[in-house]
Amino acid sequence: MISFKWRHFKKDIILMAVRWYLAYALSYRDIEELMQERGVSVDHSTLNRWVIKYAPLLEDEFRRHPKSAIGRSWRMDETYVKIKGVWHYLYRAVDKKGNTIDFLLSKNRDKKAAKRFFKKAIGTHGLPEKVTIDKSGSNKSYPLNFPG
């Protein structure tokens, strides 16, 4: 359970602001303005501290309690995305229904990144029955017949 003890703002306000920052492409000043429109006066530096403190805790909570059952057949791929002018590789896995199982951003597309992605996904959701991948060299280099 995440503790909000000794905070000047209610739990709902903190969680709403952190969610806005994580879910949408908003700056801290944008969120400060949105909060002001709702009658809550909070500084952008406070919002930054909330995100730094609560984002990792929320991720841990969500990983411990997955939102729904994940299919045992995964489809994995990677693509590249530009973030702040720098190209990164986005590894992701989805189940048959299209639900996202896990994702990982990496600066490299290699065996090490593919292995790190699979360890993260398998560690969270368990070993799948089947994984369908594309034929990139980084994916084919990591054997999927053992969990470690």
Image (cartoon, rainbow, N blue to C red):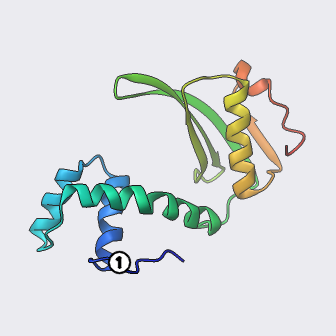
Judge by depth and name the residue closer to the eye, 134 or 102.
Answer: 102
The residue wearing badge 1 is 11
Residue 72 image offset from top left, x and y in percent: 76, 54
Q: Is residue 136 above or below residue 97?
A: above
Q: Give the residue displayed 66% in from the left and 50% down from the top.
A: 96
* View extreme (front): residue: 6
**Quadrant location of residue 85?**
top left
Judge by depth and name the residue closer to the eye, 94 or 147.
Answer: 147
Q: Quadrant of the N terminus?
A: bottom right
Q: Give the residue displayed 44% in from the left and 58% down from the top.
A: 55
Q: Is residue 89 above or below residue 132?
A: above
Residue 120 image offset from top left, x and y in percent: 69, 47
Instruction: Please give left or right for residue 91 compared with residue 12 in the image.
Output: right
Q: Give the residue displayed 80% in from the left and 29% down from the top.
A: 142
Counting labels gives: 1
For label 1, the SS is helix
**Quadrant location of residue 136?**
top right
Q: Is residue 94 above or below residue 79?
A: below
Classify mark 1: residues with Cα within 10 Å, few (<14), some (14-19) or many (20+).
few
Instruction: Please give left or right for residue 13 compared with residue 3 in the image.
Output: left
**Quadrant location of residue 119?**
top right
Residue 92 image offset from top left, x and y in percent: 60, 40
Q: Give the residue displayed 37% in from the left and 53% down from the top.
A: 22
Residue 40 image offset from top left, x and y in percent: 15, 72
